[in-house]
Image (tube, coloured by chain):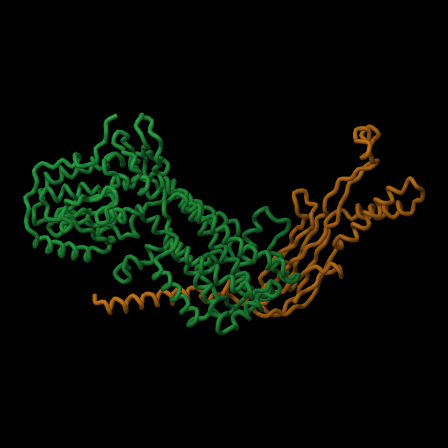
Chain colours: A orange, B green
Amino acid sequence: MSRGLRTLLAVAAAVGATAALAALSRLPYTPEPGPEALLRLSWRARGERVEICRELSPEEQQELPQHMRQTRTCEGTTAEYRLRVELDGRRRMDAPVQGSGEVQVRPLYVYRELALAPGEHRLTVTFERVGPAERDAEAEAEDSEEEEEDGEEEEVEDGEASRGRRAREAAVPRRLALERVVRLRPREVLLVTYDADRRELVVRP
Amino acid sequence: MNRLYGWRGNPIYQSGALTVALLLLLILTGVYLLLFYRVGSPYQSVGRITDQVWLGRWIRGLHRYASDAAVVAAALHALRVYAQGRRWGPRTLAWISGLVLFGLILVCGWTGYVMVWDTFGQLLAVEGARFLDLLPLFSEPIGRAFTGERPLGGAFFFLNLFLHIALPIGLGIGLWLHVSRVARPVLLPPRRLMWTVFAVLTGAAVLLPVTLAPEATPFARPERAPLDLFYAFWLPLTEGRPVWSIWLVGSALVLAVLLVPVWSRPAVARQPLKSVVDERLCTGCRQCALDCPYEAIEMLPRADGRADVVAHVTPDLCVSCGICAGSCAPMGVGPPGRTGRDQLERVRAFVAERRPGANDIVVVACTRGAGGFADSDAVDGHPVYPLQCAGNLHTSVIEYLVRAGAGGVLVAACPLRDCWNREGSRWLEERVYHEREAELKERVDRRRVRIAHGGLGERARLLEEIRQFHAEIRQLAVGPGEERIDLLLLCDPVEDP
């Protein structure tokens, strides 16, 4: 091989390799091809705290350090919720949502995606608390009764009642519902999320 | 490659050093890009850089192409090391640290693409979040950051930028570890090759400028994204698949590659023996410690009452390259069976059997490269004397062959940058031509000795060199071969304790 030919081949090989490098660094790629649009449900909310309280017996109180003695003890968790999605009258999702964390006392997270055909759809999303409604009613009644009572002895319990009410107010409402007709373009992503200020489910964009 | 670029310019031989050079180029170009990057408006700031026709565009292009070339060079380096079997025993640390470095380069590129925040960056971010959400690391799914519930804050891009800058620091530490068990590590390629690569990449950045894909948006699935195959080769395979299966397959693959030093090492009985020192012969000259490419030999005070020091081989560091055998004039060190004395015994038997004449060239061929001559009994009619590594060759063997009457000795060695034992070919040249200790004695006619370098695929060129050498040898006067040669007497005398 002559020197000239070798130089030519060397340059051609270098140019070819560089062109290949440039081409492979920007391959046209369509992620998950297809016209399907996407319904995305994503939000974070504070779930309602469910507490089971009882009075401590004098013996149990004695076992506690003096500065920790209370007459009442409560063990709690976050209430369970249920997420349901209907599209054009057909149930597409029905899933429980629990508080995150090992003992489920951390906020609730919803992060689900559903592929759907582009076009017009009647969308219904409900997110509601699961659990005995009686207990809720009892708890509310208890809170309001406690608030009405007078006297210094009741101040601690009164504080507990307002804390309970405030916690319920900060939590996501017991039932959220969204009903809407949506029109989706191919590959559009429609987000349903919870607006904590308005305390309702909203659609974006 | 050698035919086109010569061994000095062969990028495969320089793949490791090229990776380092490209990483340095990435740091330089990255510093410039950092001046204009804004975490508060990432896409717009990259857009402004791309709009700087004279500087920003090509520096961004150079940054991108250099990063791609770094992945290619690192992968080539790993494949080459694997193919050469340099992946177990004392080289385990280099193998594992090399893989970690490769992983860091990939993650660094990942964060670099997310910084741009175009459709491709979004794909990488979302997929990465999907992988991480399987691990019990975060208090809430990090994938929710990209759903569009709220604008992606500057904090995310700041964290990403931090990682993009901090990871190269990790690369520096990893590189130190990677080369910590070798002497005289070569961290940069020859200047000519390095500047040529930089120039070619610059040319690509100017002629094939890197463009900007559409801005990321959480409210549409991108129609098209420019996929960088070097950093996201896995993306088409993982998209849409269950995360647990990706973790399972990915972890199995990574583990299999990390454990290469375990599953690919030869059985103990087939492992080459480590070098040992015959303390009676060691004169404490330190040459073996200087020549050892793996810093496996140290000089310790003698315990036998004689003055000075004695060589000591650390078995955990010795790869049994045998270079010390070639570096020891009194033939007191080397792997059992391959010391200078063993080589002399073997060459005596070889001469007795093959009886090379004045018209013959003895081709001393390295078994790992050198045109594959070591597998043949003869090349072009000339007898072949196979050798595990040219650096292992004691110069007394060359002298013995010449004095025994062979017309000439041609050592077919691997190219200098392709020696499986790093410096074998280099030390051999210095011993033959530059009087490095254990040098070829002056009395040996240098016209009868030749060193030819070539890889496995360079048989034809090496054959041509043999023929040319043979023609030169035939012009020389024929001298009588010596009947009884005792080269051991010619070595530096060692006092018996």
Q: Quadrant of residue B161?
A: bottom right
Instruction: Point out residue B56 in the picture as x, y percentages from the top left corner.
Output: 50, 69
Q: What residue is rendered at 66% in x and 45% in y?
A: A101
Q: Quadrant of residue B214?
A: bottom right
The residue nearer to you, when weighing B46 against B151, is B46
Relative side of B58 to B429, left or right: right
Instruction: Point out residue B181 in the picture as x, y percentages from the top left corner.
Output: 39, 43
Relative side of B126 to A95, left or right: left
Residue B21 seen in this snapshot: yes
The residue nearer to you, when weighing B87 against A179, is B87
Placement of the C terminus of chain B among the 4 image quadrants: top left
The residue nearer to you, when weighing B310 against A134, is B310
Instruction: Point out residue B239 in the picture as x, y percentages from the top left corner.
Output: 50, 58
Placement of the N terminus of chain B among the 4 image quadrants: bottom left
Instruction: Point out residue B308 in the picture as x, y percentages from the top left corner.
Output: 32, 32
Q: What residue is rendered at 20% in x and 36% in y?
A: B491
Residue that protrudes farthest toward the front in the picture: B307
